[in-house]
């Protein structure tokens, strides 16, 4: 299918983008890697008047370490996968990036684009929520920081204003006593997830679990945080742990009516178990 | 507002200037404007892989890349892939029956060449995972996976020979 007609600009700097966004508002769409936007256009699900191609703006592709990682909005998934940008997560970010779509997609798709597209089945919204990352957005009016946990209003909907441009994602460093686990459930490698779980486990000096943060993607229209699992880990034995995790996750998610909904809710429990299991098995530095 | 654009890019080594509607995909630029029909269209939303070409040496989906985004870039299609690694991959596909109808094949060759180059030590499962983005309706993938493995081995042999020469 071919996209509907649109106008196209290729600003060479951020100020020009902001001026165009101020002028066109929600009639404009920013084009970064295009791996979500162009399929939307090819399927004629959206009719923007003008595309602003930010591919030439090097400031948006910069990445640096500064108390955590500062990843420019147009840093690609393959740059993260290949570990060519600072990794504050002790391997979680490259591991997650490797599972996104296919290499050809990852060569163009960007972390900023993924966060803004707000697909609940995508990796970055839930992983960046779990890591406590923030997006820095700028308009002609002001620059502000939005915690990714506060970014999502619903399916494909964020709290970013039409005249704002995502400049970068600031990802805090994972602490030395944190271990991570990540599980993506999909029928085929690279497809959008039926279930995604990110587990961040912290332990005290004696090696006892003292905190477990679990986030689920593809389970609702926004990333879902599941609390109360640290207690389960402390109180359940190895044999009963997975059952208890699954029951707890099922309790947190909205009611399942149809067989398909029950199956998907079951998958979320499995994904949680596998992510937690991976975190428990991970070596600490 | 601009709905048409004149762009210059390199295609298979040749500087090329075209004037096109801005909504033209790279795939349609290659196929309709430059008669390079080796690149195929299957789904036009990035999931089948039949449109895969190289932009600045990296595989991309030409169906979801705007031609205008490729200004000043270097695009290589199947028609322009003629280096030694490509020959190794082609021979392996031939020897291992890695194609039947040939529709997926140009993009499979681009993907296979990228795998041999980027993850030379990939095992069978890893090769399968890396190929997940290229759909084939004919072969059942067995011959394709074997072709990639054979190309890896041949490529290693060639590198050893080069060192000893």
Image (cartoon, rainbow, N blue to C red):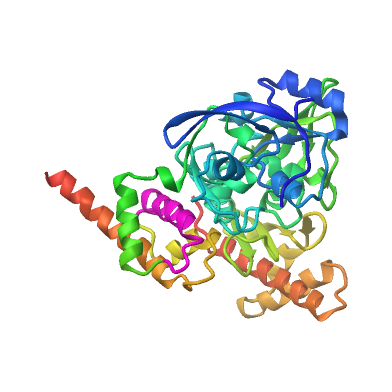
The location of residue A198, given as percent across then percent down, is: 66, 57
Residue B100 lies, with reference to residue A121, above or below; the image says below
Which secondary structure type mostly characterizes the magenta part of the structure? Answer: helix
Report the magenta residues as a range: B99-120
Q: Quadrant of residue A137?
A: top right
Indicate whether residue A233 is drawn in magenta.
Answer: no
Residue B124 lies, with reference to residue B87, above or below; the image says below
Please name the residue shown 39% across and 70% down the image: B143
The location of residue A202, given as percent across then percent down, is: 63, 54
Q: Quadrant of the C terminus of chain B?
A: top left
Q: Nearer the viewer, residue A65 or A49?
A: A49
Q: Quadrant of residue A254?
A: bottom right
**Left or right: A78, with A187 as reference point:** left
Q: Quadrant of the N terminus of chain B?
A: top right
Residue B4 lies, with reference to residue A285, above or below; the image says above
Q: Nearer the viewer, residue A89 or A5?
A: A5
- Report if residue B83 is visible in the image: yes
Please name the residue shown 44% across and 31% down the image: B14
Q: Nearer the viewer, residue B112 or B87?
A: B87
Q: Quadrant of residue A38?
A: top right
The location of residue A203, given as percent across then percent down, is: 62, 56
**Left or right: B26, with B117 as reference point:** right
- Report if residue A77 is visible in the image: no
């Amino acid at each position: 299918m071919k996209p509907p007609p649109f106008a196209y600009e290729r600003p060479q700097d951020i100020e020009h983008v902001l001026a165009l966004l101020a002028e066109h508002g929600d009639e404009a769409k920013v084009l970064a890697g295009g791996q979500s936007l162009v399929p939307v256009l090819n399927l004629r699900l959206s009719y923007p008047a003008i595309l602003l191609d930010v591919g030439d703006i090097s400031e948006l592709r910069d990445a640096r370490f500064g108390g955590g990682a500062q990843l420019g909005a147009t840093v690609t998934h393959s740059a993260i996968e290949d570990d060519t940008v600072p990794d504050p997560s002790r391997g979680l970010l490259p591991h997650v990036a490797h599972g996104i779509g296919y290499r050809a997609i990852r060569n163009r798709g960007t972390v900023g684009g993924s966060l803004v597209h707000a697909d609940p089945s995508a990796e970055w919204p839930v992983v960046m929520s779990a890591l406590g990352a923030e997006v820095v957005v700028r308009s002609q009016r002001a620059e502000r920081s939005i915690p990714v946990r506060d970014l999502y209003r619903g399916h494909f909907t964020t709290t970013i204003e039409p005249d704002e441009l995502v400049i970068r994602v600031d990802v805090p460093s994972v602490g030395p006593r944190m271990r991570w686990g990540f599980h993506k459930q999909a029928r085929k490698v690279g497809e959008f997830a039926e279930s995604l779980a990110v587990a961040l486990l912290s332990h005290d000096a004696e090696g006892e679990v003292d905190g477990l943060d679990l986030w689920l993607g593809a389970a609702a229209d926004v990333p879902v945080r599941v609390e109360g699992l640290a207690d389960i880990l402390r109180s359940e034995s190895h044999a009963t742990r997975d059952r208890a995790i699954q029951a707890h996750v099922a309790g947190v998610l909205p009611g399942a009516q149809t067989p398909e909904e029950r199956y998907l809710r079951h998958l979320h429990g499995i994904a949680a178990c596998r992510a937690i299991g991976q975190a428990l098995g991970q070596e600490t530095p | 507002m601009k709905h048409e654009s004149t762009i210059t890019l390199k295609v298979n080594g040749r500087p090329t200037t075209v004037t096109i509607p801005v909504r033209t995909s790279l795939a349609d630029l290659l196929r309709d404007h430059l008669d390079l029909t080796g690149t195929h269209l299957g789904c036009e939303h990035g999931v089948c892989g039949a449109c895969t070409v190289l932009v600045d040496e990296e595989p991309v989906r030409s169906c979801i890349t705007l031609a205008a985004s490729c200004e000043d870039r270097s695009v290589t299609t199947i028609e322009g892939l003629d280096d030694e690694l490509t020959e190794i991959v082609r021979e392996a596909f031939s020897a291992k029956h890695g194609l039947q109808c040939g529709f997926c094949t140009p993009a499979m060759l681009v993907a296979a060449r990228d795998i041999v180059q980027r993850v030379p030590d990939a095992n069978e499962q890893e090769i399968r995972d890396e190929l997940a983005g290229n759909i084939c309706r004919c072969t059942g993938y067995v011959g394709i996976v074997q072709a990639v493995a054979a190309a890896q081995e041949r490529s290693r042999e060639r590198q050893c020979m080069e060192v000893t020469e």
